[in-house]
Amino acid sequence: MNKVTVLGSLNVDTSFRIKSFPQPGETVQVKEKSNAAGGKGANQAVAAAREGAQTAFIGQIGNDSAGKFMLDSLEADHIDGTYVSQNESVGTGTANIMLDEAGQNCILVYGGANQALTDRDVQKAEPIIKNSDFIVAQFETPQAAAITAFKIAKANGVTTVLNPAPAPAKAIDPALLQLTDIIVPNELESASITGIKITDEASMIQTAAQFQKMGVPNLIITVGDKGAFYSTEAGHDLIPAYKVKAVDTTAAGDTFIGAFVSQIAPDFSNIVSAIKFAEHASSLTVQRLGAQPSIPKLEEVLVAEKESAS
Ligand code: RIB
């Protein structure tokens, strides 16, 4: 069983189902409104835990009911929340998600306490980082916190996984890339970091070379319903996605990452089977509504794997 620590965001998501996204100045009617636990970090931790990893979380909530809701959600999935700190002056993160009839989303995120996570908070979590096989970070918490966590990880032989989502508004600190063992962007995040537009396999190979120059030896680019491209020392390939009808893509990328780290070996030797497993998991997520409520359990992913093999 992999031991995974996720450093990241905890958001209460409010989803609004609408016919199509509004134009500037337009008012649209909401067909349905719902709340659920979310946040890229928390979603990835929930996916790792549901797919069988021993999982811990480093993050920050406010002193409010939303924070309690998020802590309870972690606990319900047996995620160690010892290093989730509480901020007395800033509220818990929230996200408003517009969801159109095609299952696409637009998200407005209020970072709140997520953005107040400090190096000191991360340093306190050193014991749990040291005791992990993998640490995962994204960009809904400060880059400085991820750098501190990855430094502790690298000094202790822990594999570092960076999901550069959402696409960074300012340049990534080169130190963070140099501490990253594997980066997992989607095609837009990848292009925003390397400047290389993902159009075909040749552009993905070029991207892998560019990330290597930046100090990241291993790469997975998720390319929506086309699948995922990987590049490691052992080679590269595009692993096609499983075709399903998407009703809500929220947390699909997060499910992919959490499921992937629950299965991958630290030397990446089983990368193809770990990617296929992660694609099965996220193909189930997109068929359901909401972030964490849509993330499948291990048994469901195994059934999906079996069905696609027969
Ligand atoms: O990746 C999906 C997540 O992004 C949502 O759960 C929302 O909280 C935003 O952080």
Image (cartoon, rainbow, N blue to C red):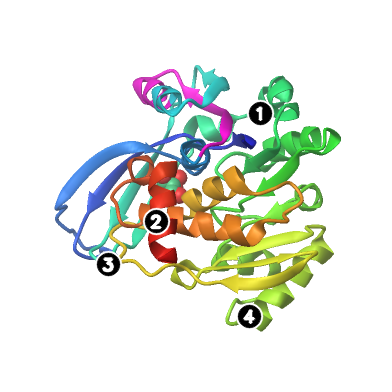
Provide the secondary structure element on which disc 4 rests.
helix
State which tag comes first along the sequence, 1 or 2. Answer: 1
Q: Which residue is mark 3?
A: 102
Mark 3 or 4, closer to the camera:
4
Q: Which residue is mark 1?
A: 118
For marks 3 and 1, give the CA distance: 39 Å
- What amino acid is labelled 4 in the image? Glu
The x and y percentages for residue 120 are 71, 23
Q: Which residue is mark 4?
A: 201
The x and y percentages for residue 185 are 60, 60
Provide the secondary structure element on which disc 1 rests.
loop
Q: For the residues labelled 3 and 2, say whether their Cβ atoms are less than 8 Å apart.
A: no
- What amino acid is labelled 3 in the image? Ala
Say whether mark 1 is within 8 Å of ligand 1.
no
- The magenta segment: 52-70
Mark 1 or 4, closer to the camera:
4
For the point 78% across and 71% down, which residue is it?
A: 209
- What amino acid is labelled 2 in the image? Ala
Mark 3 or 2, closer to the camera:
2
For marks 1 and 4, give the CA distance: 39 Å
The x and y percentages for residue 63 are 44, 18
